[in-house]
Amino acid sequence: MAMKPQRPDVGAEGDLLPPLAGIRVLALEHAVAGPVCTRHLADLGAEVIKIERPDCGDFARHYDDFVFGNSSFFVWLNRAKKSLALDVKGEGASAVLERLVASVDVVVQNLAPGAAARLGLGYDAIASLNPACVLVDISGYGESGPYARKKAYDMLVQAEGGFMSVTGTEDTPARAGISIVDLATGMYAQSAVLAALLRRARSGRGANVKVAMLDALAEWMMHPLYRHAYNQSMVPRFPDNHPAIAPYGLHATQDGSVLFSVQNEREWLLFCRIVLGRPELAACADYATNNARRTHSAALTALIERDFSNKSTSAVTALLDEAGIANGRFNDAKALWNHEQLAARDRWREIGVPGGHTIRALLPPVTFTDVEAVMGDVPELGAHSAEVLRELRFTPAEIDRLYADGTVA
């Protein structure tokens, strides 16, 4: 029998609350992997209290200054959070941390290896204060094995985890242009939080969940791993074509290029008949199956581009659409920022950033039809320190003392 929710799902006006309303999260985080997890929890309505260094904050605040003097990374990953500027090694920090741990539902940490345990925030210590708490430990390589103490950042794990070996040109491997390992890790961490909270609703018990960056990337690398292990072959690096499916990639036209994908033999027949106007080509032995097309992909690409050389990109796109062949444009960040599909679906909102400016922010990919994501402002460093301490029932005199000795800012 399903249990009733522990917290009300309906607000004072009878409206549905965000899914994680009433859930409190302590974030001991920096950079990307931890913040992407907790930012999505904040979007879903959780109260996220972010611990930052009083002197400089999360070091991602200083990655760049592209957004009105703010880091593009930081404004992306930290909206709707509360910033508590706390020197975790300060004289009064342990009392603050203990009260925080006792008050939250979830702790997410991606500090350097062993740092959380040295602060007294290992799972045993947390569970003694709050048995129902969910602790998510994010690490680079896991907490055992020869790499356990090794620091890990996105590009390093892209290389260590084999991802760069399948990305780039035939001659030159390349990193992904975004923090793909951090993103994978953060989203697995978010999934773990939700699963642990669901189990806690049934059992009343907390959990210690561990997510390693190498594990997250290795999961995403299983297609190349299986190909190597059972076919003794490596995925070739094709920068603008697919290594397993043909034709699938970027093809030159009279005035530009078009990206399209033929996924099966039915689509191949339609492509030959409608797009190329050569139905007989579908039966050619060199191209009759996907394996054959992949083997002869260079010749096939040359054949297609000869046909496209006297057709505009818009004309080719129209033919692909008529044939039901998936296709897309080669957009850059400017084109995506102005994408008509995002605008037509009202995917943009406005939020505040430090310095008093307002920026556009994209709604998260998960959409609830009955309640909108929480799209809060990006906090100034320490903007919520006093508020959080008052909520933890520190007296005004105690708060003043914490400020005076530099434990908080």
Image: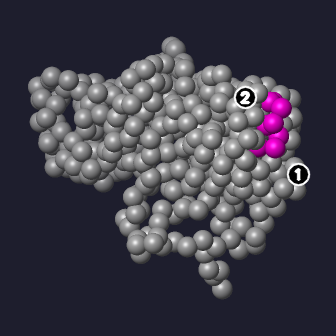
Q: Nearer the viewer, residue 393 or 247?
A: 393
Q: Which residues are magenta?
A: 89-96
Rendered residue at 77%/62% (across/down): 132
Task: Please give left or right for residue 203 compared with residue 336 in the image.
Answer: right
Task: Please give left or right for residue 332 compared with residue 305 in the image.
Answer: right
- Please state the horizontal and vertical placement of residue 313, each as a whole percent of the image: 16, 31
Q: Nearer the viewer, residue 330 or 273?
A: 330
Secondary structure at badge 1 equals: helix
Q: Nearer the viewer, residue 89 or 231?
A: 89
Rendered residue at 65%/67% (across/down): 198
Q: Is residue 285 visible?
A: no
Three-letter amino acid code of the residue under disc 1: Asp
Tell me the number on the disc at residue 404: 2
In the picture of the structure, the residue carrying the numbered disc 1 is 124
Q: Nearer the viewer, mark 1 or mark 2?
A: 2
- Please state the horizontal and vertical placement of residue 239, each as a whole percent of the image: 43, 24
Query: In the rendered view, would you say 263 is above or below 59?
Result: below
Quadrant of the rendering where the C terminus is positioned: top right
Give residue 90's quadrant in the image: top right
Membership of 93 in magenta stretch: yes
Query: In the rendered view, would you say 112 is above or below 97?
Result: above
